[in-house]
């Protein structure tokens, strides 16, 4: 039994007995970042895939969501900054050892690439939007240039898709590495986190497609895909747990947060059951032709993905080498 | 290259907190924030007790995650030394460094940038001890160059049993505690 | 005899400050190198000595661009050794505290109801002067008392003496170290004084009873203690609580509270029975050893065990360690010794133990302090008062060398048998509501006053009861009385303003001088202004205001060594000229000439003894509102033993209330569940739980021990207010 007292009343970063510096903003940022990565991956892969059946949403419309959702994520990150006026400092340096630095630069490439992807389908997918932007650009005499870009994108759609894929993967993996790079936070300090967040982001994107697709065939294909992704996620999570269980005491302590510790219920109920098993189960039933609204599974998956980020961000901050 | 370190004697430290106040005044640390703090660690059962008292602060780690995780280079190693500092004009307040410090030594200033112990480099430059070291009534805090075998810190580490805090964290801390 | 008699009178008049110190002569040449000119521009350093507590450490007040910055110790100073403590380093907080008193206030409502109106200094002086004149006419000036502690009270002492009263009391006597000083005067003819004449730095064995140095952060004491740790001295700490000092000790004796006398007597017993005391020293320098030997034989370690719960073998073992290291063994005389009522006798038992170890005037024991001589500013002889507070206590406290604040308090409540009933109090720099136990008595007294003037810097509880509140400026905004204290060095220290007074606050010298003028006593304050007052005195003392302004502390060369050499003939200032193991004086006054053990009351079932001590971060109640220090500690905790807490189902950090044996209930206080305290006691630090709303940071933060100390065990010899005979239970 140890009595540890800080006699000079230092409470910095300690919120009811636990280290806590990052609030809701970071998990939201990580989730939306992952979702964006997923969306881009799907759009890109669909652009490349040879299969006849073209799905309106995933093949043509989806890519437009990427910059929008990514911007929301960036907004969340911005809100988290305590020295906001200096946000531009992210782009006056590239710190090779800092995932956050990598992240901010990756995003810089993701934006233009996603735009090319959008342009490659905009005429078919969003005729109204296309007309509107054209008319806007007309005012500043850029409509010609705009159409040149569109022609270019349509011609090189596949090439663009191929370049998007590595960046999309980088983005997805980055949202996990950002955390796993923190040696001082045992719960995060695992190389599985990158792949896990990538898959989870992808699965959320797939769920989004299921949710908003109007074509039964598209829904069905993506339900199959999602089922696969859910299974991979479960496996990764098991790896994560085994990894921690099989290393030093600090990691075991960290793992204990979800094995008996304060985060046990949220993790196993909301993430593992409602976020993975349950939707997986529903999807199986659907594929077996049972009549259940596919929205349920999709929504569960998305909620689960968001929750995963929250719990892991919290668990990481709660797991430390010192308790004060 | 200077490798500054602190050697703090837990045997003579009485936990008075003078080092905390001296730091707050010397460096005008804002209300409610602390660059150093006192930890009392009691083990045993009445009446067989042992107590270790530690004056803690940033360890100016040789392998400092707060520097490697900083996306802007604001958190940096001071030229020609191992002193870890933060440049307010580069700091975005993203708190990556705060989260990466195993010792919870960092905090956000009211202005929004991150701060922490500087080893009083402004005093060290003038050849004086850090404020905390120069106020300690029991002379429990010794500051100096670990690379210099003749410095008091080096000699103390040769002559006494010592430890660092959570070496497992792997940051190679440079604040030593004499046992 | 005669010399001895005058020495005692001398003590009576001038207080302990002077007694026991040999004054030193010529100005020392080498001293602190002239202070290096400001390191950076915009930075100014001004000499001062600290008033955060009353230990008077000299240091430098720094301002940066004329704004408060920091305080550091003066390297030459024998109080601080160049290092201010936690509290002293936060001194600027007293200047910046937004809750400071700003302007004189005169009461408009009933006394105690917080209705005041702002007044000009002149109005305030007018009011006070009129009342004092009336009291002098109706009852005589002796019926006005001054309660003062530290800071710059001396100017008000001058004022009161000029007015015709010598009833000047400080809580630091009756509620602090009075018994210690009396016990040592009785035994050695000399007090311990402040800073203590202890030579811990050189001790090979150090014994602490209570005396929680480290939590008690008097600078030089902590430094000396640190030295003894670093030098590997054998440290023996006797404390019901695992204090910081205990955690540094080779032996921690978790004694049952209130039984220290038994342990001390048993130690004496062992030294004598095993014949391991300093025979030569005892033979040469003491009287009454035979009587002591006879008296002590019954106080065996086995007997002491039943009282103290300290095992006999441990008592023997520790006694032998003391003997082995003698004379470099120091049984620390303590400081806050008003515990159980038999305190003078308990401390005397320690004094006797020290005598057997032969450590008086020895390296590692008690050194012989030296002191600079700085004559007073010449003034007319003060009128001779016809009576003093003691007349209120016929045949009591005759051995008390200083006035008792509690005595004055009791003597204020009118009653037929008291020939001196007080009508007026001037309270300077002491929060009497908090520092005198038995509050109901204090209030009763206050309600009987015609005049209560409080001179303070903060709206402390006492000011709420005053008729007139005079706002003094902080010590960093004023010239102060010279610091001339005894120690290893003969030093003089200066306090000069580092900033102009804020608001409408004024320095104490100004307040006293101006008030004197209003009272027609200006002739007793012949000096033009403070600089002149200080310079004249300093020049007579062989230095100058100029020199002190630049050095802060001036050290005078002293011919007299601080240790006796081997076989030097020592003349002690006692009746017998020797160390009195057996005290004739005590016998004559009807007290036991050798300490006898007396059992003290024990807690009833479900009650715990209330132990009190210090937070290293605060000075009494005076700093709990300090903007800097309150960041480190803003409430106190009640320490409860782990097992007891379990029994009561009390959790660490939980708020509870304490109820004492007389049904007084405290403010809510957080629990510290800990192994560090005996199950039969609880512990808290003094100074929290302020009830003055105007102290915005400290108001109702933590609990106030004073309110729970309703039972006072008065020291029959000198009237000290024993405070540890109080018991509390938990209100959850
Ligand atoms: N930080 C700080 N330092 C201070 C002060 C301050 O306000 N703040 N005040 C200064 C002043 S004026 C004084 S007088 C001193 C007071 O400081 P000390 O002279 O050290 O006071 P004590 O009452 O001896 O010490 C209190 C200790 O006595 C223990 N104790 C309680 N009852 C008993 C008992 O029956 N037997 C024994 N052996 N121990 C017991 C308590 O557990 C506690 O550890 O501190 C001085 N130093
Ligand atoms: N219950 C209980 N009572 C105790 C003690 C205890 O431990 N518990 N300790 C006892 C001991 S050891 C002692 S020494 C005494 C201490 O007794 P005090 O010295 O009376 O204790 P404080 O509460 O510090 O009161 C100091 C007062 O002086 C004021 N003051 C501070 N600086 C200045 C200044 O520069 N000028 C003026 N004019 N006023 C100033 C403060 O605001 C405060 O009101 O208390 C004794 N009483
Ligand atoms: S000042 Fe010295 S003794 Fe006091 S707490 Fe700090 S290190 Fe310990
Ligand atoms: S202690 Fe923390 S802040 Fe200081 S260098 Fe190490 S990691 Fe960085
Ligand atoms: S908070 Fe400032 S110093 Fe810390 S990592 Fe972010 S930018 Fe760097
Ligand atoms: S070295 Fe300076 S900054 Fe660091 S804790 Fe000590 S005083 Fe504060
Ligand atoms: S002990 Fe501390 S508070 Fe008291 S006078 Fe010295 S420095 Fe000031
Ligand atoms: Mo005291």
Image (cartoon, coloured by chain):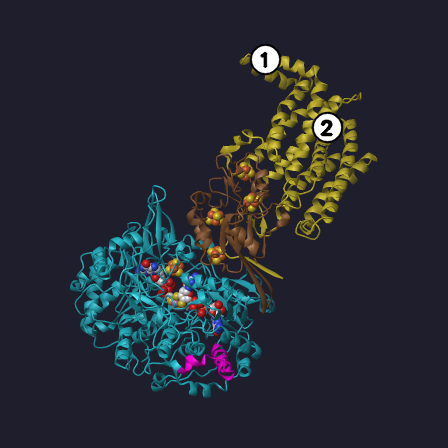
Chain colours: A yellow, B brown, C cyan
Expressed as whole percent of the image width and height from the top left, the position of residue C724 reads 45, 73
Instruction: Establish whether ligand 5 lies closer than 8 Å to the Cβ of label 1.
Output: no
In the image: residue C715, left or right of residue C382: right
Q: Residue at x 67, y 45 (%)?
A: A187
Residue at 48% from the left image edge and 69% from the top image edge:
C204
Relative side of C426 to C323, left or right: left
Q: Chain of mark 1?
A: A
| Label placed on residue A213 | 2
Foreground pick, B60 / C383: B60
Q: Are marks 1 and 2 in contact (CB under 8 Å)?
A: no
Residue A143's label in the rendered image is 1
Residue A23 shows in the view = no
Q: Which mark is residue C241?
A: none
Q: Quick one: C683 or C304, which is closer to the camera?
A: C304
Judged by depth in the image, the label closer to the viewer, 1 or 2, is 1
Quarter of the image for the C terminus of chain B: give it: bottom right
Spatial CA distance of label 1 from label 2 is 31 Å
The residues colored magenta run: C260-283
Q: Residues within 10 Å of mark 2 (few under 14, many from 20)?
A: some
Residue A242 x %, y %: 75, 46
Magenta-drawn stretch contains C281? yes
Sequence-earlier tag: 1 or 2: 1
Q: Regarding mark 2 in the picture, which secondary structure is present there?
A: loop
Confirm whether residue C428 shows in the render. yes
């Amino acid at each position: 039994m140890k009595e540890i007292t800080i006699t000079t009343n230092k409470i910095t970063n300690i919120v009811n007995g636990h280290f806590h510096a990052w609030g809701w903003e970071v998990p939201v940022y990580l989730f939306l970042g992952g979702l964006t990565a997923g969306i881009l991956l799907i759009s890109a892969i669909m652009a490349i895939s040879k299969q006849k059946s073209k799905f309106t949403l995933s093949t043509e419309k989806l890519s437009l969501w990427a910059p929008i959702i990514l911007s929301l994520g960036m907004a969340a990150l911005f809100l988290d900054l305590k020295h906001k006026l200096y946000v531009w400092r992210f782009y006056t340096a590239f710190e090779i050892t800092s995932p956050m630095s990598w992240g901010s630069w990756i995003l810089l490439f993701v934006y233009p690439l996603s735009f090319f992807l959008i342009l490659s389908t905009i005429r078919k997918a969003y005729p109204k939007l296309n007309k509107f932007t054209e008319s806007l650009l007309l005012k500043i005499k850029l409509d010609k240039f705009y159409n040149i870009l569109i022609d270019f994108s349509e011609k090189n759609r596949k090439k663009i898709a191929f370049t998007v894929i590595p960046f999309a993967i980088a983005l997805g993996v980055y949202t996990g590495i950002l955390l796993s790079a923190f040696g001082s936070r045992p719960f995060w300090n695992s190389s599985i986190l990158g792949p896990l967040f990538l898959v989870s982001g992808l699965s959320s994107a797939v769920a989004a497609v299921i949710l908003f697709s109007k074509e039964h065939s598209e829904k069905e294909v993506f339900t199959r895909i999602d089922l696969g992704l859910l299974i991979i996620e479960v496996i990764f999570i098991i790896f994560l747990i085994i990894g921690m269980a099989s290393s030093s005491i600090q990691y075991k302590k960290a793992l204990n947060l979800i094995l008996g510790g304060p985060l046990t219920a949220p993790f196993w109920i909301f993430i593992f059951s409602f976020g993975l098993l349950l939707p997986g189960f529903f999807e199986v039933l659907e594929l077996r032709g049972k009549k259940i609204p596919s929205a349920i599974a999709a929504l569960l998956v998305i909620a689960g993905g968001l929750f995963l980020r929250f719990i892991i961000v919290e668990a990481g901050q709660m797991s430390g080498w010192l308790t004060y | 290259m200077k490798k500054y370190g602190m050697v703090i004697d837990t045997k003579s430290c009485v936990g008075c907190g003078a080092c905390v106040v001296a730091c707050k005044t010397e460096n005008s640390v804002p209300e409610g924030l602390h660059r150093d703090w006192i930890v009392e660690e009691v083990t045993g059962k009445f009446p067989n007790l042992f107590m270790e008292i530690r004056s803690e602060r940033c360890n100016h780690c040789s392998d400092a995650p707060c520097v490697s995780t900083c996306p802007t280079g604001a958190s940096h190693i001071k030229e020609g030394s191992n002193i870890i500092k933060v440049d307010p004009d580069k700091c975005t307040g993203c708190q990556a460094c705060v989260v990466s410090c195993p010792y919870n030594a960092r905090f956000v200033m009211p202005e929004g940038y991150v701060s922490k112990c500087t080893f009083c480099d402004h005093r060290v430059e003038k050849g004086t001890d850090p404020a905390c070291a120069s106020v300690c009534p029991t002379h429990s805090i010794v500051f100096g160059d670990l690379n210099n075998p003749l410095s008091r810190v080096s000699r103390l580490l040769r002559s006494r049993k010592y430890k660092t805090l959570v070496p497992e964290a792997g940051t190679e801390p440079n604040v030593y505690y004499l046992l | 005899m005669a010399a001895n008699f005058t020495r005692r009178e001398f003590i009576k008049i001038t207080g302990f400050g002077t007694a026991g110190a040999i004054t030193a002569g010529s100005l020392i040449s080498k001293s602190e190198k002239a202070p290096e000119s400001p390191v950076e521009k915009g930075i100014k350093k001004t000499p001062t000595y600290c008033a955060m507590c009353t230990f008077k450490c000299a240091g430098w007040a720094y301002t940066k661009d004329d704004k408060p910055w920091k305080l550091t110790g003066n390297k030459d100073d024998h109080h601080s050794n160049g290092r201010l403590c936690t509290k002293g380093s936060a001194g600027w907080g007293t200047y910046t505290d937004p809750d400071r008193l700003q302007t004189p206030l005169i009461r408009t409502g009933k006394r105690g109801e917080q209705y005041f109106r702002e007044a000009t200094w002149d109005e305030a002086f007018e009011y006070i002067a009129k009342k004092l004149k009336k009291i002098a006419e109706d009852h005589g000036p002796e019926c006005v008392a001054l309660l003062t502690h530290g800071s710059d009270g001396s100017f008000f002492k001058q004022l009161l003496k000029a007015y015709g009263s010598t009833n000047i009391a400080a809580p630091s006597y009756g509620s602090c170290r009075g018994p210690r000083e009396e016990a040592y005067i009785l035994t050695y003819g000399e007090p311990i004084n402040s800073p203590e004449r202890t030579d811990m730095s050189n001790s090979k064995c150090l014994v602490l009873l209570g005396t929680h140095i480290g939590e008690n952060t008097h600078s030089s004491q902590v430094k000396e203690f640190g030295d003894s740790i670093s030098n590997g001295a054998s440290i023996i700490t006797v404390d019901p609580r695992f204090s910081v000092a205990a955690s540094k000790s080779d032996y921690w004796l978790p004694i049952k509270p209130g039984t220290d006398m038994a342990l001390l007597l048993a130690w004496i017993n062992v030294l004598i029975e095993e014949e391991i005391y300093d025979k030569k020293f005892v033979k040469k320098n003491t009287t009454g050893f035979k009587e002591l030997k006879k008296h002590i034989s019954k106080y065996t370690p086995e007997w002491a065990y039943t009282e103290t719960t300290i095992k006999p073998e441990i008592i023997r073992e520790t006694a032998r360690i003391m003997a082995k290291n003698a004379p470099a063994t120091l049984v620390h005389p303590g400081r806050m010794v008003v515990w159980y009522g038999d305190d003078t006798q308990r401390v005397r038992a320690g004094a006797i133990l020290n005598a057997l170890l032969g450590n008086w005037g020895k390296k590692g024991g008690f050194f012989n302090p030296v002191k600079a001589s700085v004559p007073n500013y010449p003034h007319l002889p003060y009128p001779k008062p016809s009576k003093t507070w003691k007349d209120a206590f016929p045949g009591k406290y005759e051995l008390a060398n200083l006035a008792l604040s509690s005595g004055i308090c009791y003597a204020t409540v009118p009653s037929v048998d008291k020939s001196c009933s007080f009508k007026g109090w001037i309270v300077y720099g002491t929060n009497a509501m908090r520092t005198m136990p038995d509050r109901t008595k204090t209030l009763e007294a206050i309600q009987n006053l015609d005049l209560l003037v409080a001179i303070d810097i903060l709206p402390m509880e006492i000011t709420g009861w005053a008729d007139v509140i005079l706002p003094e400026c902080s010590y960093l905004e004023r010239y102060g009385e010279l610091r001339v204290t005894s120690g290893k060095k003969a030093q003089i220290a200066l306090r000069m303003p580092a900033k102009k007074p804020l608001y409408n606050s004024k320095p104490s010298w100004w307040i006293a001088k101006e008030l004197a003028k209003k009272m027609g006593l200006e002739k007793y304050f012949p000096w033009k202004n403070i600089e002149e007052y200080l310079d004249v005195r300093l020049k007579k003392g062989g230095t100058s205001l100029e020199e002190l302004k630049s050095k802060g502390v001036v050290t005078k060369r002293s011919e007299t060594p601080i240790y006796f050499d081997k076989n030097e003939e020592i003349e002690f200032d006692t009746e017998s000229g020797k160390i009195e193991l057996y005290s004739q004086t005590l016998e004559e006054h009807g007290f036991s000439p050798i300490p006898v053990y007396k059992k003290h009351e024990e807690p009833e079932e479900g009650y715990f003894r209330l132990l009190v001590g210090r937070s290293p971060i605060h000075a009494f109640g005076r700093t709990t509102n300090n903007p800097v220090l309150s960041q480190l500690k803003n409430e106190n905790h009640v320490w409860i033993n782990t097992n007891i807490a379990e029994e009561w189902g009390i959790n660490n950090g939980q708020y509870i209330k304490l109820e004492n044996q007389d049904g007084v209930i405290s403010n809510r206080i957080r629990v510290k569940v800990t192994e560090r305290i005996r199950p039969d006691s609880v512990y808290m630090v003094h100074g929290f739980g302020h009830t003055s709303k105007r102290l915005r940071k400290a108001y109702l933060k933590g609990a106030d021990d004073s309110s729970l100390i309703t039972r006072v065990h008065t020291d029959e010899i000198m009237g000290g207010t024993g405070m540890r005979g109080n018991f509390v239970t938990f209100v959850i």
